[in-house]
Image (tube, rainbow, N blue to C red):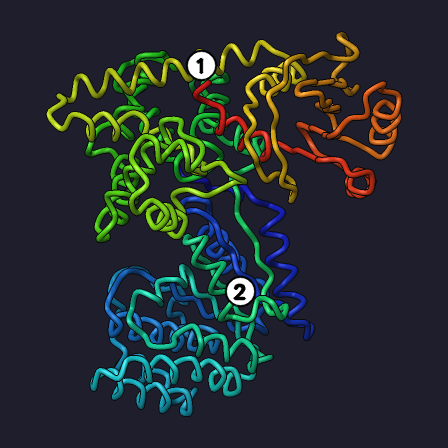
Amino acid sequence: MSPSVNLRPKLAAHLQQRLQAFEEGFRHNLALIGPAGSGKTFQLQQLLESKPSVNLLLLYCPLFPESSRSFLTRFLSSLLASALENSGHNEPAMESPQPACPSLRQWIHLAQPAFPRTAAAVESIENLIARRFYSEAFTRALDVVGILGEESRRPCVLILDEVMHLEDLGLTHAFHELGKRVMTSPTTLFILTSSSIHRSRAVLRERLQLLFGQFQLIALEALEAPIATAWVQEQLRDIGDAKEASSFLIHWLGGYPWYLSMFLQRLAERIRLSGQSHVTESVFLQTAWDVLGSPEGPLFQWCRLRVERVSQDKRGNRSVEALTQIAEGARTTTEIAKRIGRAGLTEAMQRLVEEDLALRNGNCWVIPDPLLRFWLATVFSSQRNDPRMNPATSRQRLENYLQSCWARWMQNRQLTFAEQVVELFSKFSDDTVSLDSKTGRLPHFEAITRHPKDHSPEEATYIIAQGEGKSWCASVQESAVDEAAIARFEAFCKQQAIKPSRKVVICRQSIEPNARLLAKSTNMWVWGTQDLSILEGLYEHY
């Protein structure tokens, strides 16, 4: 049930363009970061299978939690395998997580006739590995890429998938050495990926020369709702009455391909086992328990692994306590401290940030992963509060929570987009947040009105929200926002008797680039679907 089509066509086209530009002499290294399951490896696989150019030597190596010896052996084997494939041999260019076959010694023997310098360099590194000089072996292995490029007379593209695992291998100065090659190897294009968002941003900034323009940083967010919905509906095309279930899945799990794939696969199995032809509430709830509530479920195990990785730390229990409180509705550090105490809280929260489990937005803490947030608030918190709770009670809690999510979602679907925004504004509670590269306070509003009250989806609805002697003006539009829409909104704001302290443009679809520039020039906040998702997650417990 995993995606067989590329759900990020714009990204795929951009990767192809980068390779083409590199072939023409313009190098711009790439770093793809995003949560596990967001499709980074899939994009790399699609790129390799498309064979974008016979003039480029694509060198791919995934990284895993393993020993230094294992990684270095796989890395060197993949370099030789890629060289042989491009010289006419039929050996695979990509490595699998299993041990390489043939062995590194055999790869050296196979490569010697066509690439004697490369084979000799790898052979000398093999001796370093045997003597456990792993850091020196890694440094020399990076030099092999340049030797191979010279000997094959092809520019090299070095692709390291999940590059942050280098930190876990115990290779001294691994990123320093990699950064040196980035700066001094103009004939090698580097493509790196990482699921450790916070750590990888720091490494790219501080050790791989991101500040000097060497890397283009591409963040893989959740899929756009229309693309994700279309794909889910296609997967359920043979199942009746699945349209609402498809839309709710996107809302509940977010647009993460792996999460959706796991759920859809089990949902299809449950429907076949039940002998039914459509999605029922009981089948949906059973599927949710199978994949997320049951300890044997793949999504349960994934969530537990992420939490256990933090809890193993000396102060890990404090981090887990804080994380649970955020999932249960605590938004600020002050509120969290009231529930669990202040001792060691700063260090505990920093650990959550470093592990990408929580992030601070203004003065508010949020859990960016919707699946993890749900699991913590239902399954984990119930088991943590009562370790003796039987599975039936835990399952009932999950089902009740999921049913309440469904009820709120269905109620929200009955509202127009403007009405949904009004509902969101009514929940603001003097929190400070960062949206659209701006940081501001969301005041408690005492009165919220719409102008006009009746409108077509193509037109903007203007919202005036007042409280604490101040006034906000917001333009809410479902269709694409152009320059004319921004100009009309600015004129509306100028007509108000009370000068608005904030002007906000809220769009469900897109805003044209020139319209965004015009909005910025008039000091407007622009909120898109991602910003609205942050706010909905922040106030979901209201």
Do we see residue 307 in this rendering? yes
Q: Give whichever of 258, 207 is nearer the camera.
A: 207
Amino acid type, residue under disc 2 in the picture: Arg
The answer to whether the residue labelled 2 contacts the one labelled 1, judged by CB atoms less than 8 Å apart, is: no
Q: Residue at x 79, y 37 (%)?
A: 519
Q: CA distance from mark 2 to mark 1?
A: 49 Å
Q: Residue at x 40, y 31 (%)?
A: 335
Q: Is residue 304 left or right of residue 349?
A: left
Q: Position of residue 58 (x, y in %)?
A: 50, 69
Q: Which mark is residue 240?
A: 1
Place residue 485 in its image quadrant.
Answer: top right
Quadrant where the N terminus sits is top left
Q: Is residue 50 left or right of residue 470?
A: left
Residue 40, above or below 539? below
Q: Position of residue 203 (x, y in %)?
A: 47, 65
Q: Position of residue 498 (x, y in %)?
A: 81, 21
Where is mark 2, residue-wise?
205
Place residue 172 in its image quadrant.
Answer: bottom left
Q: Residue at x 28, y 37 (%)?
A: 321
Q: Position of residue 411 (x, y in %)?
A: 51, 10
Chain-order first, disc 2 or disc 1: 2
Residue 448, above or below 222? above
Q: Give whichever of 465, 121 is nearer the camera.
A: 465
Place residue 184 in its image quadrant.
Answer: bottom right
Say what secondary structure mark 1 lies in: loop
Mark 1 is surrounded, within 10 Å at the Cα level, by few (under 14), some (14 to 19) or many (20 or more) other residues, namely: few
Mark 2 is surrounded, within 10 Å at the Cα level, by few (under 14), some (14 to 19) or many (20 or more) other residues, namely: some
Q: Give whichever of 291, 517 is nearer the camera.
A: 517
Between label 2 and label 1, give the one nearer the viewer: 2
